[in-house]
Image (cartoon, grey):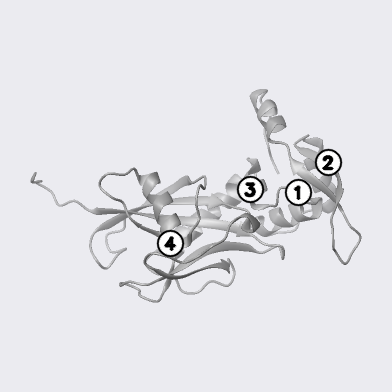
Amino acid sequence: MPTYKYPRPALTVDCVIFGFDRQSTLKVMLIQRKLTPFQGSWALPGGFVRIDESIEAAALRELQEETGLEKLFLEQLYTFGAVDRDPRERIVTVAYYALINLEEYVVKAASDASDAAWFAIDALPPLAFDHDQILLIALNRLKNKVQYEPIGFELLPRKFTLFQLQKLYETILGHELDKRNFRKKILKMGLLRELNEVQQDVPHRAAKLYEFDEVAYEQLREKGFNFEI
């Protein structure tokens, strides 16, 4: 076995998974820890990186093992390396985040998680380790990025109304948007495909449904188009 002059910290991954429900609530996926430390506490899904896997592969594996979520597109968020962030030993964690449509995924606890559930961002339980800090940075990243990239559509159903789209942005940004200006601006971009469909089974007047046109967005971006809300 090789010997090293300097001690080596352990490496973990943590995942911030955001969802958006029908009540216009921004949520985050948490797991309840089965093992010590912080046994019984709620935390972000994650775990140790194996010696023979990449960091992203470890994040995807831990997500699947602890929540049942698979085949997500993860974006690296930040590296957290405070000396005392984990009571077990010197541990550095690489955080990832993802945005998903809640209706397309079934969550189930597994591995070292006693439970897995969605929590509203404004009604979170106390979190283990430094996961409150990780979540705060992920939220700030989301608030910033949603204004210059159309990533918000990943949180919506494939077919959505303009009202749902506006509520999504208002929830993430934390303030109201002028209805007329928002709709005029988003429709003028040419990124939405109006469908010959309306909402079904709603207690109010059914609104038109739209889809995000990813092909149109890529074509516009190649021409120098800048998405901005």
Residue in front for this viewpoint, 87 or 99: 99
**Alpha carbon distance from label 3 to label 4:** 22 Å
The residue labelled by disc 2 is 194
What's the amino acid at mark 3?
A: Glu
Residue in front for this viewpoint, 183 or 67: 67
Lower position in the chain sequence, tag 3 or tag 2: 3
* SS at mark 3 in the image: helix
Lower position in the chain sequence, tag 4 or tag 2: 4
**Alpha carbon distance from label 3 to label 2:** 18 Å
Viewer-nearest of labels 1 and 3? 1
Q: Position of residue 102 (x, y in %)?
A: 62, 58
Q: Are marks 1 and 2 in contact (CB under 8 Å)?
A: no
Give the crowd class for mark 1: few <14, some 14-19, many >=20 residues within 10 Å: some
**Alpha carbon distance from label 1 to label 2:** 10 Å
Lower position in the chain sequence, tag 3 or tag 4: 4
Viewer-nearest of labels 3 and 4? 4
For residue 86, side relative to residue 29 (left or right): left
Residue in front for this viewpoint, 4 or 109: 109
**Alpha carbon distance from label 1 to label 3:** 11 Å
The residue labelled by disc 1 is 159
| Relative to 229, residue 12 above or below | below
What's the amino acid at mark 4?
A: Glu
What's the amino acid at mark 2?
A: Glu
Q: Position of residue 137 (x, y in %)?
A: 48, 55
The residue labelled by disc 4 is 66
| Residue at image coords 74%, 57% | 167
**Which quadrant: the C terminus?**
top right
For residue 60, side relative to residue 18 (left or right): left
Viewer-nearest of labels 4 and 2? 4
Q: Position of residue 28 (x, y in %)?
A: 55, 62
| Residue at image coords 67%, 33% | 226
Quadrant of residue 139 in the image? bottom right
